[in-house]
Image: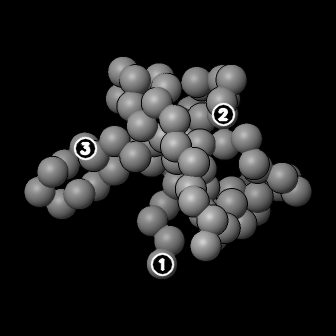
Amino acid sequence: MATQRTMNDYCWTCGSDQQHRQLTRKEEDWLKKRLGRNGVGEFWLCVNVLDPDTGKQCRNLRTGFNKKPFAEPIKAPVLD
């Protein structure tokens, strides 16, 4: 099993530097369909925990070079 890469970078919905991770295969498939693209490997997901009681994460998407790639934020759903 491959190790998932992470990075600390700015999340514009959290308003601060937060840990981000690469997307899972299911998340990539969802985003490809959502955006109508063949590749989404440049996207990272914010894993900042917004509610410690429930564990709810921010899940805002950004790229490595663009903290705000969309006019309105796109947040990945939790996929089983």
The residue located at (40%, 23%) in the rendering is 17
Report the disc number at residue 26. none
Q: Regarding mark 3 in the picture, which secondary structure is present there? A: strand
Q: Regarding mark 2 in the picture, which secondary structure is present there? A: strand
Extreme residue in the right direction: 38
Per the model, the C-alpha gap separating discs 3 and 2 is: 21 Å
The percent position of residue 77, horizontal first and vertical second, equals: 48, 61
Question: Which residue corresponds to mark 1?
Answer: 80
- The answer to whether residue 30 is left or right of residue 48 is right
Per the model, the C-alpha gap separating discs 3 and 1 is: 20 Å
* Sequence-first tag of 3 and 2: 3
- The answer to whether residue 52 is left or right of residue 71 is left
The residue located at (60%, 35%) in the rendering is 62
The percent position of residue 73, horizontal first and vertical second, equals: 53, 36
Q: Are marks 3 and 1 in contact (CB under 8 Å)?
A: no
Report the disc number at residue 63. 2
Per the model, the C-alpha gap separating discs 2 and 1 is: 23 Å
Q: Is residue 12 visible?
A: no
* 28 w.r.t. 79: above or below: above
* 62 w.r.t. 76: above or below: above
Q: Pointer 2: residues within 10 angstroms few (<14), some, or many (20+)?
A: some
* 76 w.r.t. 67: above or below: below
Q: Are marks 3 and 2 in contact (CB under 8 Å)?
A: no
Q: Pointer 1: residues within 10 angstroms few (<14), some, or many (20+)?
A: few
**Foreground pick, 39 / 21:** 21
Question: Which residue corresponds to mark 3?
Answer: 50
Total numbered badges shown on the rendered structure: 3
Residue type highlighted by circle 3? Leu
Residue type highlighted by circle 1? Asp
The percent position of residue 5, horizontal first and vertical second, equals: 57, 48
